[in-house]
Image (cartoon, rainbow, N blue to C red):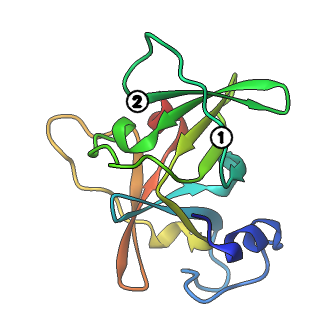
């Protein structure tokens, strides 16, 4: 499900501030798209997002990794779709329905299935806290953490997340 305000926020100029934006005047600020997976809040830089699709017909591809749901035809371009829950090591959804976030991943375009797209927010670089080490090697996917409206949001690095 996509929050209808997200679509409007994607087109909103960066100078417009919304409740929940995290920054102080004069700070370096980036726009982030927030989404949910397994009840947890995540965010990716808006500049890495090509578009958000409410739904798409996914064609399975035999012999691919479990996290690869298949491919979609996006205006004539074949795009691989990954289940972001599985990619991040979360439990698979009982009913894997939800929007797709399409990423420009450099040399290719990839789409990721998420549970729900929640919002677009501006977050100051200074508000982002380092993620604690999770084991012997830190995750390449996690850029940091930020608290937003009493909830922790994990900020993801798109190349690290999709690698």
Q: Residue furthest left?
A: 135
Specify few, some or many for label 2: CA neighbours under 10 Å numbering under 14, 14-19, or 20 or more.
some
Residue 139, placed above or below residue 52? above
Closest to the observer, 158 or 130 = 158
Name which residue lies at 43% across and 10% down.
63
Name which residue lies at 49% across and 50% down.
97
27 sits to left or right of 76: left
Q: Residue furthest bottom?
A: 19
95 sits to left or right of 74: left
Location of mark 1 (residue): 103
Q: Position of residue 107 (x, y in %)?
A: 69, 22
Residue 140, placed above or below residue 117? above
Specify few, some or many for label 1: CA neighbours under 10 Å numbering under 14, 14-19, or 20 or more.
many
Closest to the observer, 52 or 12 = 52
40 sits to left or right of 155: left
Location of mark 2 (residue): 67
Name which residue lies at 68% across and 70% down.
6
Closer to viewer: mark 2 or mark 1: 2
- Secondary structure beneath dot 2 equals loop
Q: Are marks 2 and 1 in contact (CB under 8 Å)?
A: no
**Quarter of the image where one finds residue 90:** top left
**Quarter of the image where one finds residue 139:** top left
Q: Quadrant of the N terminus?
A: bottom right
Name which residue lies at 19% across and 46% down.
134
- Secondary structure beneath dot 1 equals strand
Q: Position of residue 69 (x, y in %)?
A: 49, 30
Label 2 and label 1: CA atoms lie apart by: 16 Å
């Amino acid at each position: 499900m996509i929050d209808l305000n997200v679509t409007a926020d994607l087109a909103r100029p960066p100078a417009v501030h919304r409740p929940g934006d995290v920054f102080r005047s004069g700070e370096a600020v980036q726009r982030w798209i927030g989404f949910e997976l397994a009840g947890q809040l995540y965010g990716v830089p808006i500049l890495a997002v090509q578009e958000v699709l409410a739904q798409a017909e996914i064609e399975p591809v035999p012999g691919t990794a479990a996290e690869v749901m298949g491919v979609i035809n996006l205006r004539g371009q074949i795009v691989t779709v990954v289940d972001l829950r599985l990619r991040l090591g979360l439990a698979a959804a009982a009913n894997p329905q939800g929007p797709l976030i399409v990423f420009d991943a450099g040399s290719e375009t990839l789409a990721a299935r998420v549970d729900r797209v929640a919002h677009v927010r501006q977050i100051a670089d200074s508000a982002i806290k380092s993620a604690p080490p999770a084991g012997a090697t830190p995750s390449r996917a996690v850029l940091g953490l930020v608290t937003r409206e009493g909830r922790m949001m994990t900020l993801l690095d798109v190349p690290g997340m999709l690698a």
